[in-house]
Image (spheres, rainbow, N blue to C red):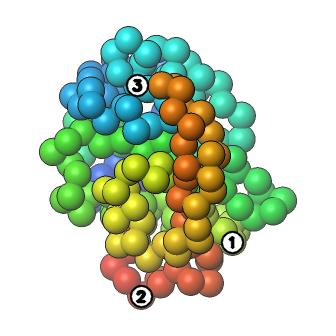
């Protein structure tokens, strides 16, 4: 996990392994869009942040990252369900402050994370998106992820909503390294 969890950077984007030291800044960043949490599996709104953050730090088989633009913490993303023997992992639990969305910043971050996983021998990278989250589904398409289908009633979210999840993936042999990947 150490190799996957090392810091990464490209241009103004910097990913640091998520740690207790990021709690206050990430809590403030997550409070900048209170409405978005209703379509997430877990809430990082001010009322639920500390319990969700504690659970994230304690999650086995994963690695969270605090995401910075310059010196400002602007979000988070994680490797989830890391299975080295199967060569698979998921990238998820991603959040950006509103002004970073739609700027191309997510592309830089995901290029770093996908490239790192492939460089470390992972052959399949998955993305699981709430079927109600059109913005994230569009972002997956821009990355070149293949929409594999819908996993019906896949999980119950923090609000009690029974969520249908859209499954996307990128296979190592599909990843186009000729694109301007920022690693």
Secondary-structure class at tag 1:
loop
Instruction: Say if mark 3 contacts mark 1, CB within 8 Å.
Output: no
Residue drawn where x is 46% and y is 53% of the image: 131
Mark 1, residue position: 123
Q: How far across and how far down the image is residue 85, in percent?
A: 84, 59
Question: Residue 72 is drawn in which quadrant?
Answer: top left
**Residue 47 is at least partly visible in this image:** yes
Q: Is residue 50 above or below residue 119?
A: above
Q: CA distance from mark 3 to mark 2?
A: 36 Å
Compared to residue 52, the image places residue 17 above or below, namely: below
Secondary structure beneath dot 3 equals loop
Q: Residue at x 70, y 50 (%)?
A: 82
Asked whether disc 2 touches disc 1, contact meaning CB atoms under 8 Å apart, the reply is no
Q: In the image shown, does 183 or 117 lie closer to the viewer? A: 117
| Outermost bottom residue | 178
Which sits in the foreground, 74 or 31?
A: 31
Query: Circle 2 sits in a helix, a strand or a loop, which is it?
Result: loop
Q: Which residue is mark 2?
A: 178
- Quadrant location, the C terminus: bottom left
Residue 161: percent from the left, percent from the top? 51, 33
The alpha-carbon separation of the residues under discs 3 and 1 comes to: 31 Å
- Residue beneath the point at 59% across and 71% down: 148
Left or right: 95 as drawn, with respect to 53: left
How many C-alpha atoms fall within 10 Å of the one at disc 2: few (<14), some, or many (≥20)?
few
Q: Which residue is mark 3?
A: 44
Q: Earlier in the sequence, mark 2 or mark 1?
A: 1
Q: Position of residue 71 (x, y in %)?
A: 23, 38
Of callouts 3 and 2, the N-terminal one: 3
Farthest residue to the right: give it: 85
Neighbourhood count class around disc 3 (C-alpha, 10 Å): few under 14, some 14–19, many 20 upward = many
Residue 118, above or below 91: below
């Amino acid at each position: 996990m150490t190799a996957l969890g090392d810091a990464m950077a490209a241009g103004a984007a910097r990913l640091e392994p998520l740690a207790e030291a990021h709690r206050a800044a990430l809590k403030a960043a997550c409070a900048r869009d209170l409405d978005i949490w209703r379509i997430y599996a877990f809430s990082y709104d001010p009322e639920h942040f500390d319990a969700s953050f504690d659970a994230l730090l304690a999650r086995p088989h994963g690695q969270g990252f605090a995401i910075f633009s310059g010196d400002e913490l602007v979000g988070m993303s994680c490797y989830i369900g890391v299975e080295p023997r199967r060569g698979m992992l998921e990238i998820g639990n991603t959040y950006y402050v509103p002004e970073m969305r739609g700027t191309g910043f997510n592309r830089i971050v995901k290029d770093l994370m996908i490239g790192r996983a492939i460089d470390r021998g992972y052959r399949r990278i998955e993305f699981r998106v709430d079927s109600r989250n059109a913005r994230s589904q569009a972002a997956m398409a821009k990355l070149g992820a293949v929409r594999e289908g819908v996993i019906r009633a896949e999980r119950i979210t923090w609000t009690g909503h029974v969520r249908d999840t859209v499954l996307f993936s990128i296979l190592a042999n599909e990843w186009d390294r000729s694109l301007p990947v920022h690693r």
